[in-house]
Image: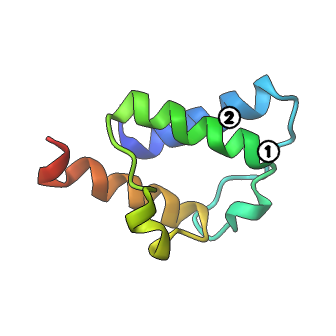
Amino acid sequence: MKVREEVIAHFKQVAQDHDRQLAPLTDDLSLLDTGLDSLGFAIVVTRLETALGVDPLTADEFANFPMTFGGFIRCYEAAVQSPASK
């Protein structure tokens, strides 16, 4: 499964599991407006680390934390393609 598809699937599943209304997931959507709360977002990040084997949102990277859904996906795409993740 492609990274984008994996991210979208986890956002949808967590929203469903927590009875949250998910906004249409467009690249320019602010992460604050996705419909997930902080717990839901943390669950997504944890599940993505398990599924993809990377966590690009570590403390060292916090200064570059993505603000949009598209930025979030690009962050994971870059981490998966990084030689350090292999």
Quarter of the image for residue 69 reads bottom right
Q: Residue at 34%, 53% (x, y): give it.
A: 77
Residue sitting nearer the eye, 72 or 37 = 37
Task: Report x, y in % for residue 61.
Answer: 40, 67
Q: Residue at 41%, 28% (x, y): give it.
A: 50
Quarter of the image that includes the C terminus: top left
- Asked if 24 appears above or below 14 in the picture, the reply is below
Quarter of the image for residue 17 reads top right
Quarter of the image that includes the N terminus: top left
What is the three-letter code of the residue carrying label 1? Leu
Label 2, on which residue?
Answer: 12
- Asked if 56 appears above or below 86 in the picture, the reply is below
- Asked if 3 appears above or below 73 in the picture, the reply is above
Label 1, on which residue?
Answer: 22
Q: Residue at 86%, 41% (x, y): give it.
A: 21
Mark 1: few, some, or many residues within 10 Å (few <14, many ≥20)?
some
Q: Residue furthest front?
A: 59
Q: Secondary structure at mark 1?
A: loop
Marks 2,1: beta carbons within 8 A: yes
Task: Report x, y in % for residue 34.
Answer: 75, 54
Task: Report x, y in % for residue 58.
Answer: 43, 56
Q: Secondary structure at mark 2?
A: helix
Q: Say which label, 2 or 1, has the lower sequence index.
A: 2
- Asked if 57 appears above or below 13 in the picture, the reply is below
Q: Residue at 36%, 39% (x, y): give it.
A: 2
Q: Residue furthest top?
A: 17
